Image (cartoon, rainbow, N blue to C red):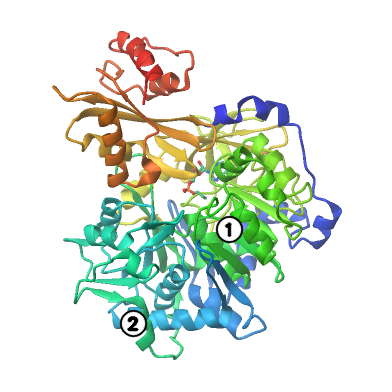
Amino acid sequence: MSTEINGLDTLLMENRKFAPSDECKNQANFNDPGIYERAAKDPEAYWAEQAQHLTWFQPFDQILDWNPPHAKWFLGGKLNAAYNAVDRHRAGSRKNKAAIVWEGEPGDSKVLTYDMLGREVDKAAHVLQSLGVKKGDRVTIYLPMIPELPISLLACAKIGAIHSVVFAGFSAKALRERIIDADSKLLITADAGWRRGGVIPLKTSADDAVADTPIEKILVVERIGQLANAQMMPGRDVYWHELMGQAPHTPFPAEEMDAEDILYMLYTSGTTGKPKGIVHTTGGYLVGANTSMRSVFDIKDEDVYFCTADIGWVTGHTYIVYGPLSAGTTVVMYEGAPDWPNRDRFWEIIEKYGVTILYTAPTSIRTFMKWGPEHIEKHNLDTLRLLGTVGEPINPEAWMWYNEHVGKGRCPIVDTWWQTETGCAMISPLPGITVAKPGSATRPVPGIAAAVFDEQGNPVSPGNGGYLVITKPWPSMLRTIWGDDERFRKTYFGKFPGVYLSGDGARIDEDSDFWVLGRFDDVINVSGHRIGTMEVESALVDHKGVAEAAVIGRTHEVKGQAITAFVTVKEGVQMNTDLATELKQHVVEKIGAIARPEEVIFTAELPKTRSAKIMRRLLRDIAEGRVLGDTTTLADPKVVESLKDLYKHAE
Ligand code: PRX
């Protein structure tokens, strides 16, 4: 858990408070502190009021139907997410405003105004329709951060098809698993993507992924061209630019979706080896995304907003696509790595486009700290007015550094706690109201009822920790897990009836502010990305030489957590550096580079309880170099000693 990351510096800095300046307060969209109480008194009324910021084809006639664990929001309402994100702005003064300002890794760039984006989305919707895509069909999208990615999402939304985006860093096998689970007929990918000047061969992965799956067509965006050397299979593979070139230049009518119709599914890791397809619906999700843009990000028409996430994760779905566009914002989208060609790329982008709001991850901030402030100082960042973080607990030191070197002490910081499942920011300061504290996500946003429960389901008293839960339904909550409602029930509502269990631990301080400590389940958070220990273990035991594997997360200075794998091998297999390297590569092939173990530790045995359960806590203690806790339940205590010894010599 990340308590260790937050350790001593948390204690030292807990008392530091940053109240909003008068200037910030006066201009903020949300600046009346009374909003918290009003929303808490009648959350349904609050959300119904926020829902008026969207355009509904037909107004809803019931706000909420709560039949735990199933919620329905805005019943009877009809709307379309792409219409709200794009078309409605085309009709008014935002028609020629920049919607997406895209910066390619090699230095190419493109600006799409709302009207231009709308034309592209309409053409893409025609293309999808010509490929047989209908309302309710699943479309898997495996693209790098190029404009065709948000265009594909929006084209699906326009038709009413359910998009399932798979992060382009995932391997062919991971993509395949997600295609099969979603039962997708169409895959949208690219010939390849750029990463630090290198070519990532996406089409090759797509080819490996789709054999014997329901995929009938692969729509291929040409991002790299010749260099990518992509092979097209006649009859199955079609080029995006060819079909877009033939598509009619006529508006594509937006499908009138029920508020509860599914907008998308997005896979995330859980505690088993099988990823969960988190299901989000149209009305509630969009209300959550749109509201948080106005409240947490204090968005204004003049803003130029830059979220550094990838659209392959939920942060990109909500805070590059649906949130900012539904709010009519100008979004900066960057294709590549922060250190390509130099370590000042983000700052160069901010200066180039006059970015006013920056949203990034603590792991990036810690990387920038390591690189040193000189890369920032080369650029004028005077346009910035608000900073955000997401993905993992931010250690107060990184918060202070972000404040000083990026915000120059004048930009409020919103530390936003949320999850794939919650759809939008749940615990976060509102920049014009809330007193921020480095390391604390502070308090639930208006309309959200969060609490920290003890084992019995009672709220803990100030100063104590426990399970971070949400006690009331909220519009952008997940509705289920694709194809597995029972897992949805058990995972999120199985511990405390009617109460959403987040999987995170948190502590409440004397001011009732929340300090998120990290996951308490078998999920690791590496550089802000969720990886299930079971997924990595399954990948390892899939290797012919491995008998058993146990995977844990240990504290890492930059990544937050790093993956340590403890492995026992089969009879006659040599435990050596070559095998360790091979195993790491095997995990990369099974899941993707994000899951590569930092170290592989070979051991003759894994510490187990007498009932043969692997003692992960003990492994974590060994990896962290901590004093061992109670080992009395251990079957063979000698194992621990030899493991400790091995860890010192790990690869
Ligand atoms: O552990 C929490 C951490 O990220 C998890 C959610 O991961 P994912 O669904 O991939 O979504 C990431 C982006 C929303 C949470 O369970 N987390 C996210 N934001 C924070 C955080 N932990 C502490 N502070 C945050 N601000």
- Does any portion of residue 270 appear in the rendered image? no
Give the residue drawn at x 53%, y 66%.
322
Secondary element at image label 2: helix
Q: Is residue 331 above or below residue 626?
A: below
Q: Residues within 10 Å of mark 1 (few under 14, many from 20)?
A: many
Q: Residue at x 31, y 72 (%)?
A: 219
Determine the residue positioned at 43% across, 59% down: 194
* Residue 584: percent from left, percent from top: 31, 37
Image mark count: 2
Q: Is mark 1 within 8 Å of ligand 1?
A: no
* Residue at x 33%, y 12% (from the top left corner): 642
Secondary element type, mark 1: strand
- Mark 2 C-beta to ligand 1 under 8 Å: no
- Quadrant of the frame with the C terminus: top left
Observer-nearest of 573 and 313 = 573
The residue wearing badge 1 is: 307
Q: Amino acid at mark 2?
A: Glu
Decide which of 458, 228 is in the foreground and name it.
Answer: 228
Name the residue nearer the viewer: 559 or 318: 559
Near mark 2 (Cα within 10 A), the count class, few <14, some 14-19 or many ≥20, is few
Q: Residue furthest right?
A: 22
Q: Earlier in the sequence, mark 1 or mark 2?
A: 2
Location of residue 334 in the rendering, given as x and y in whole percent from the top left corner: 54, 61
Q: Quadrant of residue 15?
A: top right
Q: Left or right: 210 with respect to 161?
A: left
Q: CA distance from mark 1 to mark 2?
A: 31 Å
Q: Which residue is mark 2?
A: 242
In this rendering, the label closer to the viewer, 1 or 2? 2
Q: Position of residue 491 (x, y in %)?
A: 39, 43
Q: In this view of the protein, can residue 554 be seen by the observer?
A: yes
Amino acid at dot 1 = Cys
